[in-house]
Image (spheres, rainbow, N blue to C red):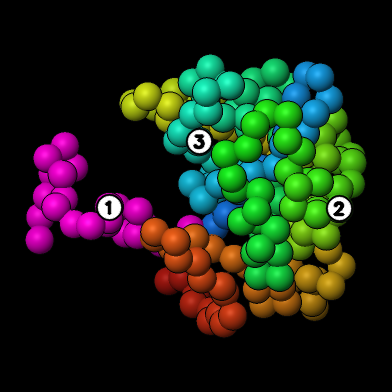
Amino acid sequence: MFYRPQDGHGLPHNPFNAIISPRPIGWIATRAADGSENLAPYSFFNAVAYVPPQVMFASTSAKPDRDGTKDSVANIRDSGVFCVNIVEYAMREAMNRSSGAWGREIDEFELAGITRAECETIACSRVAGAPASLECRLTQIVKLPGEANFTVFGEVTGIHLRDDCLHDGMFDVLRFNPLARMGYRDYTVVREKFALKRPGE
């Protein structure tokens, strides 16, 4: 099968949503100028640089009360900071609960029963029990083609690691089974790993 996205795919559901998978999930915490907080998952998320450490996430839809974007991007524009929380399998239901298109007055920490903790290097909350949390300062927001497509880049200024996720001096993802997004309504979880040496190592 071949199709041009502009012409449509003719399938019951968009296959593009499933092609690039699994995708890590960034559970993005932000704080608005009035002090209200937001917590929302994004599967267009990844690390993009080592030194200094940097991450990105993309927001691809809008809410009527946020002038062409969503709460996360609007809050980051105002505050210049955000916190990325890594989602473990045990938190899948809370993560899913926080993904709704809730009004800006809704605090998803409270809605999903998530315990919050204050970040160390930025004025923002984080998910207290997350396997890892990355405190970030905004470096740039890039407007992408499309009505509500924005990519947010941030430099990581502080990293929280849950103690039980460290093993033999390494951050071991098998100790918490990270959740990842596939296509449609499907998710997966990391439960096994293997190592490969690069040529010349």
Residue at image mark 1: 14
Where is residue 102 shown, x and y percent of the image?
63, 37
- Local secondary structure at mark 1: loop
Inter-mark Cα distance, 1 to 3: 18 Å
Q: Main secondary structure of the magenta part?
A: loop
Q: Residue at x 58, y 21 (%)?
A: 65
Nearer to us: label 1 or label 3 = 1
Residue at image mark 3: 59
Q: Nearer the viewer, residue 42 or 134?
A: 42
Where is residue 37 shown, x and y percent of the image?
77, 33
Q: Quadrant of the N terminus?
A: bottom left
Where is residue 30 shown, x and y percent of the image?
73, 34
Q: Residues within 10 Å of mark 1 (few under 14, many from 20)?
A: some
Q: Which residues are magenta?
A: 1-23
Q: Are marks 2 and 3 in contact (CB under 8 Å)?
A: no
Residue 14 falls within the magenta-colored stretch:
yes
Q: Residue at x 68, y 29 (%)?
A: 104
Where is residue 111 shown, x and y percent of the image?
76, 47
Under mark 2, the amino acid is Thr
